[in-house]
């Protein structure tokens, strides 16, 4: 009964799908923006739902609970990078579907093996790990880690197969399914069961498995027989050798990239307390979620488009255009959130979460350039420069590890977050410049685009600053920031209407 209900379209998705049909009906079939809109229907719902339930969760769970949850997701994210040995990224690249199908089969087999290996690691290392992280409450929940690796790893494989086949509606449905089930489970557990961090962790796992299971069912129903007919042992061996650069270079590159992102939670747990980790996690979550609405969808669609642009000799133009538009979309909202963050967090989540707003302020510039760079980072695959990506991600990892250790030794959590945020911003700006260099975009042109956006964006900060100067209270300050954001959205909508495109 439960499984069949998961296969039935959710009523919220049906509503959003009507909006998608209306928007997509005005766009050319198969166009880049139409594919982005399709993905954004699911992503927008998923992220909007998580934003809406966040004030409920922050009143049902303590900062310590969020801290343990953040430690769990950080470990899971690092392990998930290795779930398919990065062969999943190669699914988009082959000219023939037969080769891609064998990469998919290879990714699934590796994922199953990695889930088993994770179980062995948990069996022997769960106690030492939780002692290092100062989080004994995490110990019992580490037994769930193999399920997280399995659910997230299989999704990575199915995700890139659907991207290759341009079945973006499948991915939109998957996002809606995961966010709905995750949020409902976390709220229900927090209100009725009083399970502490287990409610957050359990909701995540149930949502992952249900959504990935649904995506697997859809692929099996539509293409299962064809996929099975393509796969053979001999072909699997050939494919493993043909795309060996992915496990040799990209696995390590992705590992360093993810580890450097997850390092704060792990090292804040080591040097400070789970509560500090919880403040960091909420600040990161609130900043990252809105950007993921657009950024994740664009990254999904930009990869095949950049691959085609490389063949057509248009990669430089396409990449620079994408960089400028992403910067234009992200700069003003992130600037305004950073400006009012402590007051905003106090007002929305409760006074005990004001510290999370202070952390968010220092992380804002870093996360802005993560938003801009992440979709463009597929350039390393398009140009088959995985080794370069590995070097850059190793530098990022090493630098962040150093600044977190320095901050931890100093014993000041806010100083640690500030140092980490500033360092991360510098490193991701450098990453942006190098990605555009790979696409033959001059460095001067890149910095010119950044300077232009700063010049055009800073005036939006005048309204909240005037409100603070005149009224000097939290509500007027936050409302003025929201008002400035609305003005930005209106102006952006007018520009979109004139140009006829968002991306």
Image (cartoon, grey):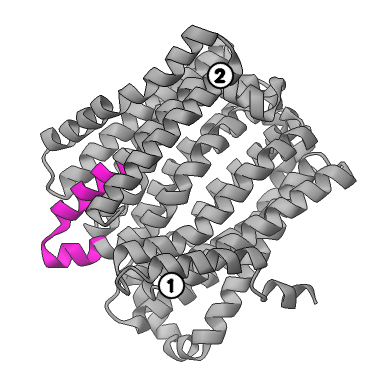
Q: Is residue 114 positioned above or below 490 on the image?
A: below
Which label belongs to residue 476?
2
Residue 116 shows in the view? no
* Most foreground residue, 430 or 365: 365
Q: Nearer the viewer, residue 124 or 477?
A: 477
Viewer-nearest of discs 2 and 1? 2
Mark-to-mark CA distance, 2 and 1: 48 Å
Q: Quadrant of residue 291?
A: top left
Instruction: Say if the magenta span includes residue 304.
Output: no
Question: Residue 403's quadrant in the figure?
Answer: top left
Question: Which residues, given as a range, are shown in magenta?
Answer: 306-326
Q: Quadrant of the N terminus?
A: bottom right
Residue where numbered disc 1 is placed: 161
Q: Residue at x 55, y 83 (%)?
A: 220
Q: Earlier in the sequence, mark 2 or mark 1?
A: 1
Q: Which residue occupies 13% across, 44% down? A: 441
Q: Which mark is residue 460?
A: none
């Amino acid at each position: 009964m439960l499984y069949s209900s998961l296969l039935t379209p959710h009523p919220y998705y049906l509503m959003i799908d009507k909006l998608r049909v209306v928007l997509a009906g005005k766009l050319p079939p198969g166009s880049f923006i139409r594919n982005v809109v399709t993905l954004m229907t699911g992503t927008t719902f998923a992220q909007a739902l998580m934003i809406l339930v966040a004030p409920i969760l922050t009143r049902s769970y303590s900062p310590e609970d969020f801290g343990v949850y953040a430690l769990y997701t950080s470990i899971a994210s690092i392990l998930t990078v290795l779930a398919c040995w990065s062969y999943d990224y190669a699914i988009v690249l082959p000219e023939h579907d037969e080769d891609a199908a064998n990469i998919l089969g290879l990714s699934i087999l590796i994922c199953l093996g990695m889930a088993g290996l994770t179980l062995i690691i948990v069996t022997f290392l769960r106690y030492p790990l939780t002692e290092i992280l100062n989080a004994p409450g995490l110990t019992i929940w580490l037994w769930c880690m193999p399920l997280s690796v399995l659910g997230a790893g299989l999704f990575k494989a199915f995700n890139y197969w659907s991207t290759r086949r341009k079945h973006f509606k499948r991915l939109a449905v998957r996002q809606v399914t995961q966010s709905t089930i995750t949020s409902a489970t976390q709220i229900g557990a927090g209100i009725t069961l009083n399970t502490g961090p287990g409610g957050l962790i359990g909701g995540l796992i149930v949502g992952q498995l249900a959504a990935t299971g649904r995506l697997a069912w859809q692929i099996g129903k539509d293409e299962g027989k064809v996929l099975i007919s393509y796969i053979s042992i001999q072909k699997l061996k050939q494919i493993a050798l043909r795309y060996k650069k992915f496990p040799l270079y990209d696995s390590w590159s992705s590992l360093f990239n993810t580890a450097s992102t997850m390092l704060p939670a792990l090292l804040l747990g080591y040097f400070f307390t789970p509560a500090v980790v919880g403040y960091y996690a909420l600040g990161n979550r609130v900043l990252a979620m809105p950007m993921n609405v657009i950024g994740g969808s664009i990254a999904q669609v930009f990869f095949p488009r950049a691959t085609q642009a490389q063949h057509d000799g248009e990669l430089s133009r396409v990449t620079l255009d994408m960089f400028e538009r992403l910067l234009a979309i992200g700069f003003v909202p992130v600037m305004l959130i950073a400006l009012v963050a402590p007051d905003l967090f106090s007002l929305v989540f409760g006074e005990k979460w004001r510290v999370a707003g202070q952390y968010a302020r220092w992380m804002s510039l870093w996360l802005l350039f993560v938003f801009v760079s992440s979709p463009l980072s597929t350039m390393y695959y398009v140009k088959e420069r995985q080794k370069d990506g590995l070097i850059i991600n190793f530098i990022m990892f090493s630098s962040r590890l150093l600044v977190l250790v320095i901050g931890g030794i100093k014993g000041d959590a806010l100083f640690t977050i500030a140092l980490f945020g500033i360092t991360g911003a510098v490193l991701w700006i450098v990453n942006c410049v190098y990605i555009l260099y790979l696409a033959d975009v001059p460095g001067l042109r890149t910095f010119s685009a950044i300077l232009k956006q700063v010049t055009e964006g800073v005036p939006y900060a005048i309204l909240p600053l005037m409100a603070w100067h005149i009224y000097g209270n939290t509500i007027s300050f936050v409302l003025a920031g929201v008002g400035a954001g609305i003005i930005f959205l209106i102006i952006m909508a007018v520009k979109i209407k004139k140009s006829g495109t968002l991306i």
